[in-house]
Amino acid sequence: MRVLCTTTGSASHGRAQLPLLRALAAAGHEVLVVTNPTLASVFQDDDVRVDTTMPDLDPRARMMERADELAALPKDDKAALNSAVAKLMFRGMAGTGAKISLEGVFPLAKEFQPDLILRDGFDMGAVLIAERLGIPQLPTPSGAINVLDPVDLLPHLNATREEVGLPTYDDPLSVVPHGRVDCVPPEFTFARNLPPTWSYRQTVDVERASVLPRWVAELPTDKPLVYAAIGTALPKMLELTGGAAGSGPEEGAAAPPIEFPDPTATLRTIADAVSRLEDCTVVLTTSGVPLDTDALPPHVHVTERLPQPILLESVDLFLTHGGFNSIRESLRTGTPLAVLPQFGDQHANALRVQELGIGRAVTDTTPDGIAAVCRDVLADKAITARARTARLAMLATPGIETAVGDLEKLAG
């Protein structure tokens, strides 16, 4: 079986796909990953072929093309604004974004002749490629798929289908006609508008040969261990905007309708918050974002990166931005969450975490407010119990290697 995989966005998108691609490669299937040069290193240690001709599919740029719709966004209601922005991004990805992807990737896909496409959740062009080739496609685990509204998307995707000579569809779920791959049990799904299908167990060893640094093993264990992380997507946003928070994705572009957080300021706030947790031991990762550590108290230990899924196995609380990779990894280890969302699907994820009872969303984003939520979660035995239930549900889900047989049947 030949499998084409598309990957865009940040490195977290590729890491979400790695366990499935490894399982396919280990079973002897040929896997071709189409991505951009920045993300190619995610796949460098695996037995997959990587092509770096994926066009730039920045969904923010596609959103900025829709000036009239941007002007009409509900700016006074934060929840409504985030939902509207997600819809607007998908409309752009189903329009210009899909055509860019189709034009850039289809020649390679036609030559490769895949039996199946596994696609990034934001890549609507891969939907059209699969339809043109007459093969199935499945989105891989992503926050984008969780906030996708297929009813809102359908007319925009149909307009592009018609423009490129493909049949249109009446069913909104034509964007996922064969379902989606997820690594969350159905009862803990984060997808608001899509049926739970093809669910597998999240792995704890995404990066090969992962090991914690020795200093972690020497941390005190007589008080709660808190892990705080800013994630990888927000620092990537800093790179795309040239270091200017709130600026557009392209030079000369107008400012977007929402202000993308400044990762430097966010990290400083998180550091100030965990500094107030004197009765805890804290590990804080920066993802390379600059942070002045001179004034931090001794209970806060700062490092640029470490293997997060492994550390979470021994953590009492995870203070997180709420990216979907981090959410799944926390479910896998039964780790209670305090979610400080930054942008995109993270706001919806924070609400879902609270709905499920596995943690709490941070609404007071001052250092004192963040610290208060952390203390509340640590003291709430119901959250700890519910997180353990989530872990058991995850452990009762089939391993990712079982996906190989399922995908073989789907591809015929």
Image: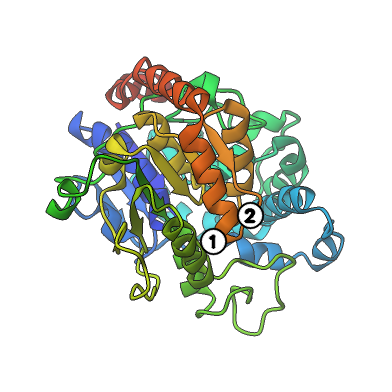
Residue 50: percent from the left, percent from the top? 28, 54
Residue indicated by mark 1: 57
Nearest the camera: 363 or 328? Answer: 363
User: Relative to 334, is 215 above or below?
Assistant: below
167 to 265, vertically: above or below: above
Question: Given the image, on which type of amino acid does mark 1 rest?
Answer: Leu
Helix or strand or loop: what does disc 2 sit on? helix
Is there a contact, CB below 8 Å, between mark 2 and mark 1? yes
At 36% from the left and 68% from the top, the residue drawn is 296
| Mark 2 vs 1, N-terminal side | 1
Residue at the (51%, 51%) spot, across then down: 321
The residues tagged by marks 2 and 1 sit, at their Cα atoms, a distance apart of 8 Å
Q: At which x and y percent is residue 304?
A: 30, 64
Q: Which mark is residue 93?
A: 2
Of all residues, the one furthest to the top in this rendering is: 396
The answer to whether residue 98 shows anywhere in this view is yes
Quadrant in which the N terminus appears: top left
Q: Residue drawn 40% across and 52% down?
A: 228
Residue 12 at x, y percent in the picture: 40, 51
Q: Is residue 23 shown above or below 73?
A: above
Q: Residues within 10 Å of mark 1 (few under 14, many from 20)?
A: many
Q: Secondary structure at mark 1?
A: loop
